[in-house]
């Protein structure tokens, strides 16, 4: 199995709080995303923050998991970003999760599940009963996580093509 | 999915749902309506792969010995099947345009299937069992056919 496969060794979850992201979190989020993807994208995160943490907050959710106690208190352990979207692709209003990650050092401790449960709870509270996401089919770790939470293939199939130059 | 693969997955789900439990081949076979002879061959393969272990003697049988959160359906399928078999092209230097076009479609389907099977762990399958309940049909008062059980979505 490759590094991207579902894993098993669980660690104990540090005390965390799930809250909305603030501007002070941005540098930590850029750093976390950069460590995971290898491509720091500060402009992208600034834009995400402006769009999803400052406007229409009743249907946009930019959440972070922050450690509460100990030497790592105040550390951003993960994030999830989502919103309610309506009528895209002819779809009834539904919740979308389009950003999700947990600090690699703190994975398999339940932080991802806490983030997922928190955002799905907030989306459900808006009256929405369906959530969607999109995962690279090579990313078995994240896909296995969403599967374990009960998500499965939905009624849409993503299509794409290379444009000739 | 071939019959051996299907039996292997069902047996593993059964065992992984209670890893401490020893279950005999005949009990598993009876539950999933497959012959003990066929099941024994499947269990041997699973044993060689380290997914189950057997204990001899009274009360013996098979128990789960893998990690349910790590083993995916694709891991099990690949023990029994060549997962690339559905999209073989043959000799690429001799393949015609229609063969290439069909190969592309079959490869797309295979990649989707492998992504699906590769992301579903035995732990997830065990968890999903909670969505189903066993429906037991009432005994035929006239003494006709025996009762049967079946699973249905809750």
Image (cartoon, rainbow, N blue to C red):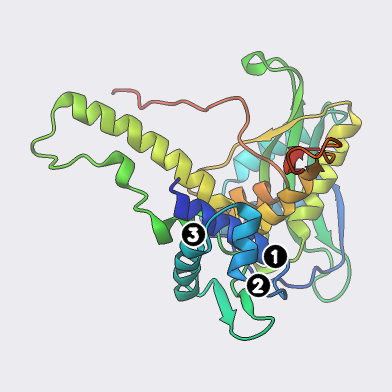
Q: Residue at x 64, y 81 (%)?
A: B60
Which residue bears the numbered disc 1?
Answer: A108
Q: Marks 2 and 3, how far apart in space?
A: 20 Å
Q: Nearer the viewer, residue B100 or A81?
A: B100
Q: Looking at the picture, how far across and down is residue A16, in whole percent?
A: 86, 62
Q: Are marks 1 and 3 on the same chain?
A: no
Residue holding disc 3: B76
Please say whether residue B71 is visible from this viewpoint: yes
Q: Nearer the viewer, mark 1 or mark 3?
A: 3
Specify the subunit that label 1 lies on: A
Question: Counting other residues with Cα less than 10 Å from the Cα at mark 1, is it few (<14), some (14-19), or many (20 or more)?
Answer: some
Residue under label 2: A9
Q: Is mark 2 in CB contact (under 8 Å) with mark 1?
A: yes
> Is B143 placed above or below B130 here?
above
- Where disc 1 sits, the SS reads loop
The residues tagged by marks 1 and 3 sit, at their Cα atoms, a distance apart of: 23 Å
Name the residue: 65% across, 47% down.
Answer: A147
Q: Nearer the viewer, mark 2 or mark 3?
A: 3
Query: Would residue B69 be seen by someone viewing this image from the given angle?
Result: no
- Could you tell me which secondary element the residue under label 3 belongs to? helix
Q: Nearer the viewer, residue B43 or B25?
A: B25
Neighbours of disc 2 within 10 Å: few (<14), some (14-19), many (20+): few
Q: Mark 2 lies on which chain?
A: A
> Which corner quadrant of the image does residue B133 belong to?
top right
């Amino acid at each position: 199995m490759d590094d991207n496969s579902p894993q098993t060794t669980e660690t104990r979850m540090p005390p965390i709080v799930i809250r909305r992201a603030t501007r002070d979190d941005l540098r930590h989020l850029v750093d976390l995303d950069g460590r995971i993807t290898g491509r720091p994208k500060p402009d992208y995160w600034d834009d995400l923050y402006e769009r999803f943490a400052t406007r229409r907050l009743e249907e946009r959710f930019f959440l972070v998991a922050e450690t509460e106690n100990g030497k790592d208190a105040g550390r951003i352990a993960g994030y999830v970003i989502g919103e309610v979207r309506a009528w895209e692709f002819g779809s009834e209003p539904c919740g979308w999760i389009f950003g999700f990650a947990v600090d690699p050092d703190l994975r398999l401790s339940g932080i991802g599940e806490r983030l997922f449960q928190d955002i799905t709870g907030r989306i459900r509270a808006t009256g929405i009963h369906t959530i969607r996401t999109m995962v690279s089919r090579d990313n078995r770790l994240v896909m296995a996580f969403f599967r374990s939470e009960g998500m499965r293939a939905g009624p849409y199939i993503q299509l794409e093509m290379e444009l000739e130059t | 999915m071939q019959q051996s693969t299907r039996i292997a997955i069902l047996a593993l789900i059964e065992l992984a749902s209670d890893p401490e439990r020893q279950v005999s081949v005949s009990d598993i076979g009876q539950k999933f309506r497959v012959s003990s002879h066929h099941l024994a061959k499947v269990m041997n393969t699973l044993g060689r792969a380290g997914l189950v272990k057997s204990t001899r003697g009274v009360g013996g049988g098979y128990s789960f010995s893998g990690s349910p959160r790590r083993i995916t359906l694709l891991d099990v399928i690949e023990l029994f099947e060549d997962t690339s078999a559905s999209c073989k092209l043959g000799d690429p230097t001799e393949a015609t345009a229609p063969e290439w076009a069909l190969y592309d479609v079959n490869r797309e389907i295979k990649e989707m299937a492998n992504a699906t099977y590769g992301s579903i762990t035995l732990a997830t399958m065990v968890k999903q069992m909670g969505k189903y309940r066993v429906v037991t049909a009432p005994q035929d008062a006239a003494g006709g056919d025996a009762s049967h059980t079946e699973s249905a979505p809750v």
